[in-house]
Amino acid sequence: MALYKGDLLTLEKVYDKKNNSFDIARFILAIAVIFSHSFVLLLGQGHGEDPLVKLTNNQISFGSFAVNCFFVISGFLITQSLLTGSSYTQYFKNRILRIIPAFFFSLFLVAFVAGPLTTNLGLKEYLAMDENSPYQFIVKNLSFNFFGYAWSIEDVFSSVPFPGSANGSMWTLKHELALYLILPLCSLFLILSIKRIMLVLTFFISGLSVLSILFKYQLLNLVGDYYWVISVNEYSNFIKLAPYFLFGSLFYLYKDKLIIHKRLILLCFIVILVALKAGLLNVFLIFTLPYIILTICVKYKTSQFRKYGDFSYGLYIYAFPIQQLLVYYFFDKLNVATFFILSTIFTLLISFFSWHFIEKKALSFKGFKWRNYGKET
């Protein structure tokens, strides 16, 4: 007697480049990051954590969960973009035009709008600073911290419950950029063509991530003082995020083999629940979350959402400074619920402007059809 009757569909058969849920998934994930930050930015470090932190016994927050999902989706779509693109030059051009313009605008707003509004210095003194200046803030962050860190500017946002950070969401961008650089190297040296090598690489990096988690992210603290994403300060973050990106990439490579079925999703959820109880949630999410999020994105068709624009990147990079500004001016009048709602509304408005007048226009420089972004680039 057969245990299962029916055709088993592969990801390749289910996936429709023109009709999927990648756009709406990223939008929801960006909102989840805003929700997660609403607790710590209003209540302060150690005084407020989002509900998922409590639910998982301090294992993961909604923000961290959302970032992990972002990296899975990015790995899948960026691999697709690289393998279906015309050249490495076009690949890098696509990445630059998608990331840099809006990121620069967000840094500019912090340095020359939010900064003067919240500093105790006079405008002339603020603009004339040599150390911790608005110019250093832009240069160091626009270079993705390759030349050092500048999380804030002098005394900007120094009196809020979460001081010393003008845009705490920026920390993930350098790691995503590093993976954007690693991926074409994998292609150049045939790792993407010989899929078994990519399989081994993904599980090797995942193994390093598991070791890092089990040793409380202290495993390789003997690395030198500063080597960008593999420095003492950054290695644990990079090795935590890289497996999600690589599994997204791997699933694209094996899309003709990977079975999409609700029973496998159920199995993943069972594994997650057992890992949660065992205190090993972050270990097993590496191997289960990519399958869950990609299955949902390819199985459900919500292409109509795309017609409004792609606001997820804007929601991610503008939200933190907007939230800090709201806390700075209206701290006594806010609770977490109103703070989250207002943060989402104001960030969505800025993201709408950014998409239509910055991001979309930047993408036009490469003959880019923006409706294809959620599918290939």
Image (spheres, helix red, strand yellow):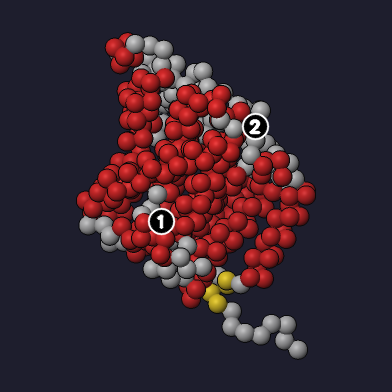
- The residue indicated by pointer 2 is 48
* Viewer-closest of 356 and 293: 356
Above or below, 303 against 92 in this view is below
Going from N to C along the chain, the mark reached first, 1 or 2, is 2
The amino acid marked with disc number 1 is: Ile
Above or below, 224 against 338 in this view is above
Where, by quadrant of the figure, is residue 215 drawn?
Answer: top right
Q: Residues within 10 Å of mark 1 (few under 14, many from 20)?
A: many
* Viewer-closest of 228 and 301: 301
Q: Residue furthest right?
A: 277
Alpha carbons under labels 1 and 2: distance apart: 35 Å
Name the quarter where the C terminus is drawn.
bottom left
Name which residue lies at 54% across and 57% down: 247
Name which residue lies at 55% across and 77% down: 9
- The residue indicated by pointer 1 is 78
Above or below, 148 against 364 in this view is above
Where, by quadrant of the figure, is residue 218 drawn?
Answer: top right
Residue 325 position within the rendered picture, expressed as x and y whole percent measured from the top left = 45, 28
Name which residue lies at 69% across and 82% down: 4
Name which residue lies at 37% across and 15% down: 131
Which numbered disc covers residue 179?
A: none
Residue 116 position within the rendered picture, expressed as x and y whole percent measured from the top left = 36, 19
